[in-house]
Image (cartoon, coloured by chain):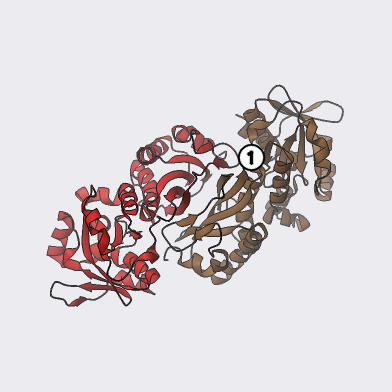
Chain colours: A red, B brown
Amino acid sequence: MAEFALIERYFSNLSRPGQDVLLGVGDDCALLQPPTGHQLAMTMDTLIAGRHFFPDVDPVALGHKSLAVNLSDLAAMGAKPAWALLSLSMPEIDDDWLQGFVQGFQDLAGRFGVKLVGGDTCQGDLSITLQLSGFVDAQRAMLRSNAKPGDQIFVTGALGDAALALQLLQEGKDPGELRADLEKPWPRVDEGRALAELGVRSCIDLSDGLVADLGHICKQSRCGARVEVERLPLSAGVSDYLRESGDLTPAIAGGDDYELCFTLPPLLREGLDELPFTCTCIGEMVAGEGVELLKADGSRLPPPKAWEHFAS
Amino acid sequence: MAEFALIERYFSNLSRPGQDVLLGVGDDCALLQPPTGHQLAMTMDTLIAGRHFFPDVDPVALGHKSLAVNLSDLAAMGAKPAWALLSLSMPEIDDDWLQGFVQGFQDLAGRFGVKLVGGDTCQGDLSITLQLSGFVDAQRAMLRSNAKPGDQIFVTGALGDAALALQLLQEGKDPGELRADLEKPWPRVDEGRALAELGVRSCIDLSDGLVADLGHICKQSRCGARVEVERLPLSAGVSDYLRESGDLTPAIAGGDDYELCFTLPPLLREGLDELPFTCTCIGEMVAGEGVELLKADGSRLPPPKAWEHFAS
């Protein structure tokens, strides 16, 4: 399989040169022109069949998700997506599968202006590595290390849908509408850019679950977080599950949500109300360390099982 | 395995913030400051155990090679290496193996000023994806599409050592000194930058073999190449093999050489003689298409077996 040949054939719509892409797929390197006055945000994630996704997952969803998880990292910095490099390892060339994968990738790439500028294809077990770059206004990047005691903690969207869908699939049950939350998460790119523009300086995307990811903010900002679990935004599906099982795990320790969790200095509160999307305040940053989960009566919840794994 | 945790532990020496690295490993994205007046060259390659390398290869050599093959792509553009993102998939955490891999990677990265700014680790079959960015002076990048009839064709180093080493290993023989050419190729980064500085505008690295790679220059420059096989620079090992077997395949169709092949307008010839490394003229670009191999008596050699695969 010749280097790039596959990518060129399937992705030609995505790899045309443009203002910032002097040379796309087809040479030893892509040649790119970063805009002045900006910094570059770069991320890379690998998805492996059987580990990060079911091998028989809809290829359209997989193409979407492999870009979405990287877009979510850019969103958490407040970056504008720009250039992607894709490495695709496949056991064989399956035209139908590839066309589906490309469609899922392409639809999302088009929505956020991502240009595919290079990559690699090889024969092997199915896995996808995507590297993505974006632009951030100088001094406006949102970092895990910028939270301060007194900041309020917010999340976009609802928590736990993807984790509950995964749990149902693993139990052999149909996750219904929740399936899309697991397989085709929507990266909060527009929300991230709006938050950075507003002046938010600390944010993370919820890929490992709320407690783990908020724990990263705590650790890197050297403070603690107090979360009131009754305030967590939950979909009808997760609410029903919680009511029946009493199990908060999907909402507080489930991965793959790809919502943003950010901290808001009190001065920015009014600006937040004017943004064209809803965020939910779930608690506040405090002096100390680690994430504390509080019930409505003020008592503390024990940390979720997955927490220990990430806490050290 | 927590995202980045492994990379942070093993690669901390390589991931310190600096002038162009505002934020390295440890947030959702790396944050980078591209220098003004430059373009970015970007490449990404995946190496899979059992396909691109023997699973039991020395991890030091593998760490070296996974960076070297990407450095070679930057070299072919004349770019100065800058930032790397590494995705490492491993069946288990093997401390000895990882320390070896990091050492090989780190030694080469230090030599060329590469900073590791991010990546991913996951459990799976052993494979390595590296994404690398470098800086090119505006308008100075060497492209596959810039060769012209009348240009002389040059290569750095000697051809076929890696391919012959692989052939010997596959036959169960000891490749001796040739092993290093296969397992620890030296990327021609300094040479590529010097050539771009001199004014060379067309270059490729020899990863797929001379005929295939020079064929890319022909195709993208819309001209042909005439190579005199007696002029090919060969090591003693490949010369001996050729004398005994009559087989030119390693030299003309062997992969993994990572030498540079470039085309030189006659006006630049004097400048080339002043460079502190040796290049060998092996033929010239001509009107027409494809790579023609000529013997000393002027007769044509048939294309090598591997040629057809890449020619279409």
Residue B28: % across, % down: 41, 58
Dot 1: what SS? loop
Residue B239 vertical position relative to residue B180 in the rendered view, above or below? above
| Chain for disc number 1 | B
User: Residue B192's image quarter?
Assistant: top right
Residue annotated with mark 1: B141
Residue B149: % across, % down: 73, 25
| Residue at point 58%, 71% (across, down) | B96
| Residue at point 72%, 22% (across, down) | B287
Q: Specify whether B245 is left or right of A277.
A: right
Residue A136 vertical position relative to residue A308 in the rendered view, above or below? above
Residue A107 vertical position relative to residue A37 in the rendered view, above or below? above
Please tell me how crowded label 1 is: few (under 14), some (14-19), or many (20+) other residues with Cα within 10 Å.
many
In the displayed orientation, state which residue is furthest to the front.
Answer: A267
Residue A247: % across, % down: 19, 67
Name the amino acid, label 1.
Ala
Instruction: Look at the image and tell me whether residue B32 can be seen.
Output: yes
